């Protein structure tokens, strides 16, 4: 098989002339900040999810504002799996609250609810499930646990734009859902994030907080105006989305059906070709319902780093998603051990997947893995 494998990328932004034209239009209008384009993007996303959506400048900002909006403060605790990108933890700690590291279920890399329940205290105010690789795990169990202990649920669905659960689109139901729109996610706005909820109080707080806490400034920005005589009643941040970002996002939303189809096809190809290879374990994910942001396998027998190095020698980039947060100095610095999480972490390997990869490139990657393990 001949292929220019040096061009294979682990992930990438998938943009074309339509996005370039949309950004150019914003530049020509010379209103680059938060205005009509953001308003239109929010409206289109609200139609997509059938719930109100607020746009911000990153997925991390979305989590931070959602957590702040439910009233978290110093001394409060949030249950969260340790196996997630550090952004999840930083969003919690930014409110003054403490992330409580929980184990993952190895088969799905989603939060272990048995371990989470053991760690509930009078200070526990919320649970933050991470939809790892687009998979939601036992989301029904998350909401059952939350109801039992009167906890808020903030879903970190950074990986899960377009995923469905029990025939319902993630974000279209539940308490609060946050999704990332950064450059390599299922759709992108360059950078960006969204918060989805029916909680009117949370929505109101977030709309103001994204604009430095200036009350009702969203309404003025959407009219192309600024607030001059205003009040501030809460801590705010400069987290609003720009028209440039929204212009990219609006085009990407139209393209999402094709992105979804391609990602699911590639993941299914990986899964079908790798499922019976000795030394590999696949995550329990049904790609009829999950739209994968990343494709992750487990390399057993302590061979992950060997396989990673040999694949990269073939020109095949790989990743490791993620170093558990309880091993980071700022978040306990190895003072706590999570046996299952640490075992899984040492086995995880992320393979290239994005809508620009061709099937013959996937086949080349699979052949490389088989040859190495053989």
Image (tube, rainbow, N blue to C red):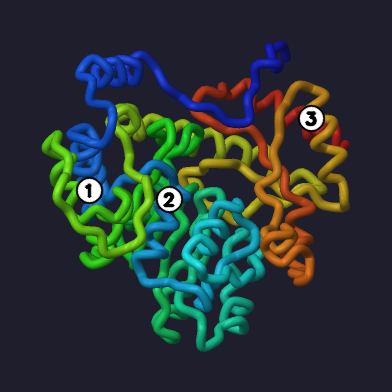
**329 lies left or right of 71:** right
Residue 27 against residue 243 in the figure, above or below: above
Of the image marks 2 and 1, the number of the one nearer the N terminus: 1
Which quadrant does the C terminus fall into? top right
The Cα–Cα distance between marks 3 and 1, rounded to whole angstroms, is 42 Å
Tell me if mark 2 has few (under 14), some (14-19) or many (20+) residues whose alpha carbon lies within 10 angstroms of its own.
many
Residue 76, x across and y down, in percent? 50, 77
Residue 169, x across and y down, in percent? 34, 53
The Cα–Cα distance between marks 2 and 3, rounded to whole angstroms, is 35 Å
The Cα–Cα distance between marks 2 and 1, rounded to whole angstroms, is 19 Å
Question: Foreground: 56 or 313?
Answer: 56
Q: Are marks 3 and 1 in contact (CB under 8 Å)?
A: no
The answer to whether one can see residue 125 in this image is yes
Q: Residue at x 79, y 22 (%)?
A: 314
Q: Are marks 2 and 1 in contact (CB under 8 Å)?
A: no
Which residue in the protein does label 2 denote? 61
The answer to whether one can see residue 169 in this image is no
Residue 5, x across and y down, in percent? 70, 17
Question: Foreground: 304 or 249?
Answer: 249
Which residue in the protein does label 3 denote? 311
**271 lies left or right of 95:** right
Secondary element at image label 3: helix
Residue 46 is labelled as: 1
Q: Residue at x 52, y 72 (%)?
A: 78
Of the image marks 2 and 3, the number of the one nearer the N terminus: 2
Secondary element at image label 1: helix
């Amino acid at each position: 098989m001949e292929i220019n494998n040096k061009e294979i990328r682990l992930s990438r932004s998938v943009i074309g002339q339509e996005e370039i034209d949309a950004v150019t239009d914003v530049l020509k209008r010379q209103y680059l900040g938060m205005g009509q384009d953001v308003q239109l993007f929010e409206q289109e996303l609200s139609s997509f999810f059938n719930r109100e959506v607020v746009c911000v400048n990153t997925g991390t900002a979305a989590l931070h504002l959602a957590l702040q909006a439910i009233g978290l403060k110093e001394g409060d605790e949030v249950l969260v799996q340790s196996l997630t990108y550090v952004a999840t933890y930083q969003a919690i700690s930014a409110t003054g609250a403490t992330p409580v590291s929980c184990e993952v279920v190895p088969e799905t890399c989603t939060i272990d609810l048995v371990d989470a329940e053991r760690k509930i205290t009078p200070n526990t105010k919320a649970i933050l499930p991470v939809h790892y690789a687009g998979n939601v795990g036992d989301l029904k169990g998350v909401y059952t646990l939350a109801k039992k202990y009167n906890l808020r649920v903030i879903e970190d669905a950074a990986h899960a734009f377009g995923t469905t659960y029990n025939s319902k689109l993630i974000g279209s139901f539940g308490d609060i859902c946050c999704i990332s729109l950064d450059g390599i996610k299922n759709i992108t706005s360059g950078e960006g994030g969204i918060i989805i909820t029916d909680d009117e109080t949370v929505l109101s707080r977030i709309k103001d907080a994204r604009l430095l806490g200036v009350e009702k400034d969203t309404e003025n920005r959407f009219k192309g105006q600024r607030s001059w005589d205003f009040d501030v009643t809460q801590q705010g941040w400069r987290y609003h989305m720009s028209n440039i970002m929204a212009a990219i996002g609006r085009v990407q939303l139209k393209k999402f059906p094709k992105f979804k189809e391609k990602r699911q096809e590639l993941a299914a190809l990986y899964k079908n070709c790798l499922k019976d290879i000795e030394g590999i374990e696949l995550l329990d994910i049904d790609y009829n319902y999950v739209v994968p942001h990343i494709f992750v396998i487990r390399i057993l027998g302590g061979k992950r780093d060997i396989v990673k190095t040999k694949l990269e020698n073939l020109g095949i980039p790989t990743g490791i998603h993620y170093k558990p947060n309880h091993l980071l100095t700022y978040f306990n610095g190895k003072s706590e051990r999570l046996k299952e999480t640490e075992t899984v972490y040492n086995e995880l390997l992320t393979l290239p997947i994005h809508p620009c990869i061709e099937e013959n490139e996937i086949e080349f990657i699979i052949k490389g893995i088989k040859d190495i393990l053989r």
